Amino acid sequence: EVQLVESGGGLVKPGGSLRLSCAASGFTFSSYSMNWVRQAPGKGLEWVSSISSSSSYIYYADSVKGRFTISRDNAKNSLYLQMNSLRAEDTAVYYCARDRGLITWDYWGQGTLVTVSS
Amino acid sequence: DIQMTQSPSSLSASVGDRVTITCRASQSISSYLNWYQQKPGKAPKLLIYAASSLQSGVPSRFSGSGSGTDFTLTISSLQPEDFATYYCQQSYSTPAITFGQGTRLEIK
């Protein structure tokens, strides 16, 4: 069974940092591109970042470029999102999602809440 | 970035109704359109990919159609578990992947 489990969310002050993790199981992690998607409270879905299977290709939404860094460790079946210089508008539930191909996300984690507030 | 506009933003319907949700892209995206269902407090779930292909395990009452700029998601006979928010997503213009604003389907 495919499982994605996010962790690392919490309360952080503006300007602070946080590192999210996504532990994958039930599939060959190293064969899939992975993504982070977020959802602000009561709002819609927003793509944040993508990383290819071998980390050769990495992309960011303009809203996080220069502040967030996506990475993965295929030996540990894990995906990460390092978030620096956090702002109030980064407050959201962050989901990791598997790309089955053609930017079609077939499995999602349960999400981890990041709250940026003083 | 390609803008995705869904209509309506919210919809009230009854069990057994046929429901159609529309998604319009600001430019042609061929058939690079996916639909997701999200229930409160849960992660999104893939329903339809490539505009009209049903994801494995999704009931056949869900269907998708369209190409270019106009797309529809149809639920042929609403079931109680279908009341949720639905999002379209374009996968044509990568990496700038964008979603529609969502359509909230409520019980009448």
Image (tube, coloured by chain):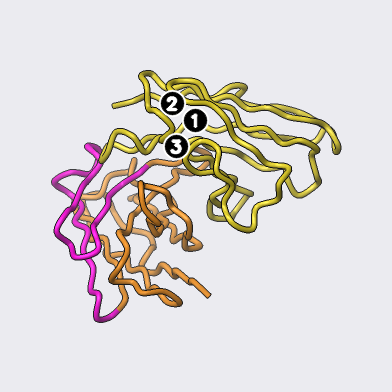
Q: Is residue A81 visible?
A: yes
Q: On the image, numbered disc 1 is attached to which residue? A: B101
Residue visible at 21% across and 64% down in the picture: A71
The number of numbered discs placed on residues in the rendered structure image is 3
Q: Is residue A96 visible?
A: no
Q: Are marks 2 and 1 in contact (CB under 8 Å)?
A: yes
Left or right, A27 with respect to A70, comes to right
Q: Which chain: orange?
A: A
* 10 Å crowding of disc 1: few (<14), some (14-19), many (20+): many
Q: On the image, numbered disc 2 is attached to which residue? A: B4
In magenta, the rendered stretch is A47-76
Residue B22 x, y percent position in the rendering: 58, 24
In the rendered structure, does residue A54 fall within the stretch colored magenta? yes
| Quarter of the view holding residue B15 | top right
Q: Secondary structure at mark 1?
A: loop
Marked residue nearer the N-terminal end (2 or 3): 2
Give whichever of A79, A20 is nearer the camera: A79
Q: Are marks 2 and 3 in contact (CB under 8 Å)?
A: yes
Left or right, B10 with respect to B91, comes to right
Asked if residue A88 is positioned above or below residue B23 in the image, the reply reads below
| Quarter of the view holding residue B25 | top left
